[in-house]
Amino acid sequence: MTAEPHELLVQKPGFFKSEDWWAVWLGLLIVALGAGQAAGVDLLGWVAKYNVWSDIGKAVAPNSKEFAFLGGFGSMLATYLFLLILTTAGAYFMGSSVKRFVAGFTILYWVTVAANTVGNFAYLAATPNNLEKFGIGWSLGLGELGFVIALVLGLIIGNFFPKAAAFLSTAAKPEWYIKTGIVILGMTIAIKTVGAMGLASTVIFRGICAVVEAYLIYWPVVYIIARKFFKFTPEWAAPMASGISICGVAAAIATGSAIRARAIVPTVLSSVIIVFVAVELLILPWIATTFFADDPLVAGAWMGLAVKSDGGAIASGAITDSLIRAKALAEYGVNYQEGWTLMAATTAKVFIDVFIGIWAFVLAVVWSVYQIGTKRSEGKSYKVSFREIGDRFPKFLIGFLVVFGGVFLWGITNPDIVKAAGAGAGQANLLRSIFFGLCFFSIGLITNVRKLWAEGLGRIVGVYALALFGFILWVGLGISYLFYHGILPPVVAS
């Protein structure tokens, strides 16, 4: 049987037993290796770099000339072995079957590699200024299409080949992969902040303001819709409101646990949320590019506020970043720096994740004080401690903040190392891209659309659809426009 989404995301206590903490450890290790560039030591030069190609022989190569002897396949193999060792160690400590994880991860990795390679084919990925270089007359300019290919492949396997999906489920851990990628992303964002202090601080500050304003609106409205219009009990309405408005599956699970809901509640909600995330991921980046190519940070923040999972939101931000840069170059002749649209999406999503711990703690207190739902009928009192907010707080954010803060302070106190540190961040980002691809493929694998409908989840789908398409998308867009309109990314120096 294919593992349920909530089974893939339940967190165990301890520094070496939860996906969140292992995202921190893997992210910190990769960032530390990338930082070796600042000391003149190339520790990640062997990592595979995926190039836009018209000649398949040039599609993949080691990112540093010092490791050119490895060739493309050698660099892919070295990257595979490195990631296999690290993730298998994490899987072992988290209690997964090592044999099944190794087998599953091997398939996930090579499918991701294939999707990434195909997605970089020149007719699909070349930007307008590089068409002549590849000897072609046109290109779709979809630089992150490999992620979409990985997602579609995952959806096909997950829905039409259930036995294969079940076999791969041990390694299909989308939240672990994306959280590791976010920790690594902290290095790039810190370097960008040092290089463009005023703009970066504006993006981060406005991202915090946007999140606070959005979620003062989102949660209560979803809760009211679920209770008043669809007649859900508080046991269902609270996790539903958190999952739809805060951060998808993780928020639904945390809230369900905080109010001591039955296990079936976050289980069912997880299935619905993941399906909607997959749909948003396939649609929203193209809508954002169509209407906001001249306002990239609005588009990025919208992805962070609208897509309800870390994987979906950050991946949508990455796709939107690529699409908008290609369109801006083709239509306006403006060559925006890579990553700023993604930065806006990441900033919004990271601060959204803070609400998981805070809101779970608040709801635990409210359910205890007012004896809501099953508590009243059971006559039990649940006392909450302030330690719970620490237990609920997403640990991978600690890694992100440590990386961001450490690299930022290092950069502003040692300006001479910024360029080298930027090169190291670029190397770390190659691994971050692999983690993103693994996340996309995993999301597809665990998205069982047929099972969702077979379980008759019409009312839950109704709440989600009404909330998402009725106001979350548009409130999120309005708030993104309010805080980011007119703020443009830096352009690449000619």
Image: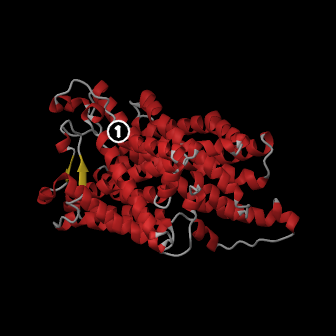
Give the residue drawn at x 49%, y 45%: 304
Instruction: Kindly tell me whether residue 22 is visible in this rendering.
Output: yes
Foreground: 460 or 259?
460
Q: Determine which residue is flagged by label 1.
A: 322
Quadrant of the rendered image containing residue 424: bottom left
Locate residue 224, reporting x and y percent. Answer: 75, 44
Q: Secondary structure at mark 1?
A: helix
Relative side of 163 to 326, left or right: right
Relative side of 45 to 294, left or right: left
Give the residue drawn at x 17%, y 32%: 134
Quadrant into which the N terminus falls:
bottom right
Foreground: 346 or 47?
47
Locate residue 220, reporting x and y percent. Answer: 70, 47
Q: Residues within 10 Å of mark 1 (few under 14, many from 20)?
A: many
Instruction: Kindly tell me whether residue 399 is visible in this rendering.
Output: no
Locate residue 324, reporting x and y percent. Answer: 36, 34
Q: How is the image coloured?
A: secondary structure
Considering only vertical position in the picture, is 25 above or below 137? Answer: below
Foreground: 339 or 65?
65
Give the residue drawn at x 68%, y 64%: 257
Considering only vertical position in the picture, is 423 above or below 232? Answer: below
Quadrant into which the C terminus falls:
top left
Give the residue drawn at x 49%, y 75%: 15
Q: Amino acid at mark 1?
A: Ser
